Amino acid sequence: MRIAYDSIAELARLAASETMTIGQLVLEEQAEQLGRTKEQLLAVLDEDLTVMEQAARRGGRKDVHSHSGLTGGDGWRMSQYARAGQTLSGPLAACAMAIAISVAEYNAAMGRIVASPTAGSCGILPGAVLVMMEQRGTSRQQACEALAAAGGIGLVLAQQASIAGAEGGCQAECGSAAAMAAAALVELNGGTPEMAANAAAMAIKNQLGLVCDPVAGLVEVPCIKRNAGGVMCALCAADMALAGIRSVIPVDEVVGAMREVGESLPCSLRETAQGGLAATPTGQALARKIFGAN
Amino acid sequence: MNIFDIIGPVMIGPSSSHTAGAARIGYVARKILAQEPVEAEIGLAGSFAQTYKGHGTDRALIAGILGMRPDDERLPRSLELAKEQGLRFSFHTVQLPKCHPNTAVIKLTGKEGAVAQVEGASVGGGNILITRLNGMESAFTGQCDTLIIPHRDTPGVIATVTQALALYKVNIGNFKLTRPIKGDMAIMTIELDGQLDSGVVELLKKQPNVAGVVYLRAN
């Protein structure tokens, strides 16, 4: 078996024809390509899952802060609020946000994380997968298979569009992570491969055009909050897909649109810290404060 | 590309290009020096020069020079560890024409007096491209196991090395020879499809006109 990873629709079609999830199909195929067993790949993914869990826990402490002093402590704030039980978005979504923020804050504080697909977007997939383990009884094995599904979707995005903010803007990082997380959530909730593909499409559509405009060029503002936004976008897309809603524009055309939008973004909005939020008076004042003080 | 390029690498944040890639460049420099470093002079170009402190690029480079991998949890404390271990270091800005925006030039001096100079770029996602070694042009990524063999440019040296690899049934994925002056010092950079056991490395080191063998394991 050889998969080219040039089409999400094809990935879903193949999985359905083999009566597997996308995650199981990707595991089978990658094991063959890498000359290892499926169990060996699952063991690596299990280690990744452990790193994600540690990052969520350590990043969720009250005293976490980045070297620049710009960020930290919001993961803790969000989880306190989620635990108090008065959230608008419900306990599952609020906890997913708390995990996403905690992991992203831990990254900014030079903690150990799993780039998924990138360091800047590293909170979204853990937010989706860990909250299913915490609140919906997802097993470690299922979680690892969901990571494999996310990996398969990410491989297509990396090859057919981009997963680098410097190339395609934030849609390429947080947008890709949300698409990967949306597909993972659908599979964890018993949806079909086709539903997973639709969820990926809808997650990308809802973040199409998102620019990469980090204040002072650092992976902090607005990156960390975009991880919370990204996991919410994934939940929204997964729920729509599980409800039977389909993307009118086929998933691979959505990916093509993401590439085209990314290519037409001006340089100032592709990780150069020259436009968007980075160029606001406050963004510039913060940049002067951080680098002027050093 | 495989799924672990997407779900991974495991790394110390905050930036795959400014932190993980920088640690990898430092690690290669340490391997090329092949002895304990006592001094590191690091030139930073482009985006590295502008934002290195905020991204911990300085800490990542020094961590790599101390022999740490990009996921080593000691990485954030590397500057303090360097001082404890007697490694002096300094950072300065360099202007390099036509280089990748995330480029570092590392000059290391070892305990026994060896000097290594490595220029490398962090090209995204934690991946790197080493562009110069000891003043000579180079081009390798460290994504597969790589042999770096400085040698005197004389007939038969390359054949001796490749025969040894053939003997141990290791396939060559890529071979590059850098030779600024005919008959002078040159560097073979050999990317391998498999792993080498230490016996081959020791055997290669003993060959005539081979000045050294650096074996970089893929990470």
Image (cartoon, coloured by chain):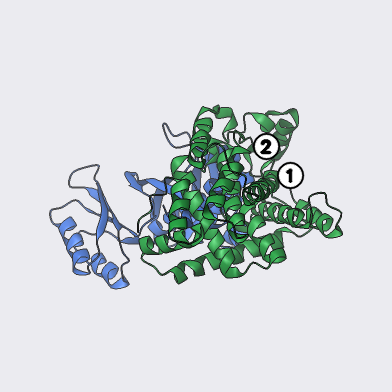
Residue found at x 81% / y 53%? A77
* Chain A tint in image: green
Whether discs 2 and 1 lie on one chain: the answer is yes
Q: Is residue B98 above or below residue A92?
A: above
- Give the percent coordinates (x, y) of residue B94: 49, 37
Residue on which the image places disc 2: A215
User: How many marks can you see?
Assistant: 2
Dot 2 or dot 1, earlier in sequence: 1
The label on residue A70 is 1
Amino acid type assigned to the residue bearing label 1 in the image: Leu
Q: Are marks 2 and 1 in contact (CB under 8 Å)?
A: yes
Residue A122 falls left or right of residue B100: right
Give the vertical position of A176 relative to A14 (above or below).
above
Q: Distance between the residues labelled 2 and 1?
A: 10 Å
Question: In the figure, what tint was chain B given?
Answer: blue
A135 lies left or right of A200: right
Q: Looking at the image, which residue is at 15% across and 58% down?
A: B159
* Quadrant housing residue A212: top right
Residue B177 rendering spot, x and y as whole percentages: 24, 48
Picture disc at residue B216: none
Towards the viewer: B140 or B59: B140
In the image, residue B68 above or below residue A161: below
**CA neighbours of label 1 inside 10 A, class few (<14), some (14 to 19), many (20+):** some
Secondary structure category for the residue under label 1? loop
Q: Look at label 2 and name its amino acid.
A: Val
In this view, the residue in front, A107 or A53, is A53
